[in-house]
Every structure is written in structure tokens, then in C-alpha cells.
Image (tube, rainbow, N blue to C red):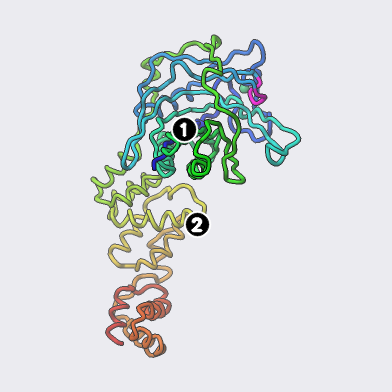
Amino acid sequence: MKSMIGLEIHVQLRTESKLFCGCGTNSSEPNSACCEICLGMPGSKPMLNKKALIFALSAAKALNFTISKEMFFSRKTYFYPDLSKNFQITQFEVPLGLNGKIKLENKEIGLRRLHLEEDPASLVHSGTIQDSIFVLIDYNRSGIPLMEIVTEPEMENAEEARELLKSLRQIMEYLGIFDVDMCIIKADANVSIEESNFSRVEIKNISGFKDIVDAISYEIERQRKAFREEGVIRLETRGWNAEKRITESLRQKETEDDYGYIFDADLTPIIINEEIERSIINVELPQHRVKRFMLDFGIAKEDAEVICQDKEISRFFERVSAFADPVLASKWIRRELTRVMNKKGIKQPPQNAENFVKLMDLIKSTKITERTGQRIIEKIFDDGFNVEEHVQENNLSALPTDSGIDELCRKAVAENPSVVQDYKNGKQEALNFLVGQVMKATKGRADAKKLREIILGII
Ligand SMILES: [Zn+2]
């Protein structure tokens, strides 16, 4: 049985200042970045942050939206303490973008609308919302630019939602309008199942990529179980409890009309003129880059996809591949370079591609073994590191086959008769042990494949 999922995704845009005032977006001291405009004091006048507009337009273009040539902002009635002016400035009647789409591996998901709005303040409870005896409000968040993207309810499982979010994040990172470490992402999800004839349940305010997917998975299972037991799914709004990893009932559904939108006369209508159009960011998008890498460099789709997940790594690959074997480089960047970056907590590939290019040449020409290469790559981020000098100084060149390897192999066989017997009895791993012994003796400078051949010749 199918399920049906639609998302309203709120993405914080990577701007230095808020959507309608000059307050910064990166203050940690609570209530230190707020002014009369983002607090909505009488007489204060908001002014649109042009960068936020350009960023949202760039996303709209990359996601194939039809961009409105003229648009305006509306006030949405919002009577909660996290927006002190009692309304939220958003776009309702004419959104910035209409009818976009995003491509997943095997299908396309329609995107209904894209618009700009301000984020409310953050509410801080002691412990959980239910048992907290007070609530603190930090208005630093109030007025931070959010881009809202509403998808059609066309995803059929949590996996497709994950794919959509991943693709969206990559596109935004390529455009440079979103920073996963600095910017928040929140979503409301509509989830329904075929069994109940797609009776809609909304889950409000889920934060972070992982939680959005987890909340959807949980909710599908919950509805299936509830339907089996009660034969009906109630239309309702639920919340995601990130600690307990469950959704909980909040209230009966309300409709958009309940919010009473009115035109915001403090903000002038926005006309997308030529000057603004010229500022729209135009970059090669990840899906296109994957195809180009496969075509131009002949690398595997799987490798291209992993490399292109990160804009900087994909650029690094391109720089390396101008001088080194692209297929070899793709494997080494995908597996080894990212391994070292994760281990060391480094976000960016090396500034200079030269050492990596030399490393690829040494491996390709079998001047060093792959195992030596794996060790050398650990040092590639060190200041002043030079691959060739390092190989020379530490005597790391691969051993030629006639340099006493035979002798070492014979020694390993002679010293481990029981292991040899194990191998003869059909235990394949026993051979790896013998190869490992010789490897150790040569400090990883011998070629493992050759060692296998030699050892098999002896036993
Ligand atoms: Zn402000």
C-alpha cells in the first residue's frame, strides 16, 4: 500500500543580516541582535534585504520555478509571543516562484510554490514544553530570512523524501545560499496512507534533515497501526518529539484562511527588473556535473555522484584530473581523501592539488604501493608537505620484485607451518595472514598481488 507525502520546507538563507532590517544573523548572546523593526515597534519601517531576494530567486531558477515578475509581501496573523508584532511578514497571494520541479533518481517531484518570509523568535523551555514552568524568548531569530518551498504530495515513502532533501541541499550549497553548519532547515510534513483513503495528517515544525525523514517514517508506521486497530485516521496536526522520536497529537486541523492575510503596505511591491535578473546566481548544478564528469572523464556514475555531493570536492577532482588519471583520481578522492577529511574533521579539500596529482602518478606508475599511498594521503593536509620528498626521505618506494621479497616470503611460509596447513585445508584467509607478515616486514612497500603469487608458488 502506498503512502503520500508532501513537504513545506523552510530553509534559512545564508545572509549576514535579517530579511527586513540590518540586525545580524549570527549572534549567540540572546536578544542582542534585535531592533525596533524586527520587534515591530510602532512606526518602524521594514526594508527588504536584496541579497535574500537574489538568493531565493536563484533557488527558484535552479528548481525550474516560474518566477513572478511582480510580487508583494503580506501580513499573516500570528498571535504567539515568538513574533512580537503579532503578524508574520510572508508572501501568500503571489509567491516568488510557482510550479517548480526537482528531479530524483527515478521520478520528478512537483514543487507548488516558493516564497520568502521571516522566521519567528526561538522559544526556550527548561526541559520539555510539557513540564517547563517558564518560557524564554530569544528574538535574535525573529526576522531571519526563510525560503519556504512547498512540494506537491508526490513522495511515496520516507526514502523519496530523503532523496528530495539531499538533492535540494546540494543545489543550495552549489548556489552558495545555504550553509549546513550555520543555517537551519525545518519542515512541516503532510503524511497519509492509502488504507485510510489518504486522510491527511500534518506534522509541524520538524528540525534538521535527519529528523524530517525519521518523523515521516514514524508517522507512516503509526498510521498503518492506528488504521489496523481503529479503522480510521483522524485529520489532525501533530508535533515531532525529537527526544522520544515520536509524533504527538497537537490539535485539529486549521486551514490557511484562518490566518487572515492582509497586504503589507510598509513594503513596496517588488518588480524583477533586468538589474535583479542579472544578479541571479547561475552555476552548474550537481546533477549536470555528475553527467559531465561521466562523459568528459569516463568515471563511474557512483563515483561521480559521491564526488559531486560536495561542490569543493568536485572542483578539486576537476583540478586533479587536468593532470592525473581521472579514473584513479576519482577512486582515491572518493574513498581515501574523504576518509582522511572525515577522520581529521576537515571540511575543505587541499588548497593545492599538486601533491595529490604527484601521489596519483606515483601510484599509477607503481613507484609506490597502494598501501603506502594510503599512508601518505594522511599527511596531505600538513603544512609544507611534499609527496616526492616524503617518499625519498622515508625510503617508501615500492620494492622491485627481485629485491629479496622471495626470501621474505619463504621466511613467512617457513615460520608459520600451521597457517600454511590451514590454507591447504581450504581456509582462504590464511593466505592473507602470510601476505600481511611480508607486508609488515617491508613496511607496506611490497605489492600485495605479487606477494600472493610468490607465496602461492612456494606452498
Ligand atoms: Zn532588527
Q: What stretch is highlighted in magenta?
A: 80-84
| Residue corresponding to mark 1 | 199
The answer to the question of whether label 1 and label 2 lie on touching residues, with beta carbons closer than 8 A, is no
Can residue 170 be seen from the camera position used here? Answer: no
Judging from the image, what secondary structure is the residue with disc 2 in?
helix
Expressed as whole percent of the image width and height from the top left, the position of residue 278 reads 36, 21
Q: Quadrant of the C terminus?
A: bottom left
Question: Dot 2, crowdedness within 10 Å: few (<14), some or many (≥20)?
Answer: few
| Count of numbered marks | 2
Kindly identify the amino acid type of the residue bearing the numbered disc 2: Lys
Judging from the image, what secondary structure is the residue with disc 1 in?
loop
| Residue corresponding to mark 2 | 343
State which tag comes first along the sequence, 1 or 2: 1
Expressed as whole percent of the image width and height from the top left, the position of residue 426 reads 33, 82
Expressed as whole percent of the image width and height from the top left, the position of residue 259 reads 56, 18
Residue 137 is left or right of residue 342, and the answer is right
| On screen, residue 137 above or below 214 | above
Q: Which secondary structure is most common in the magenta stretch?
A: loop
- Ligand 1 lies in which image quarter? top right
- Name the residue: 35% across, 83% down: 423
| Residue 60 drawn in magenta | no
Kindly identify the amino acid type of the residue bearing the numbered disc 1: Ser
Q: Distance between the residues labelled 1 and 2?
A: 46 Å
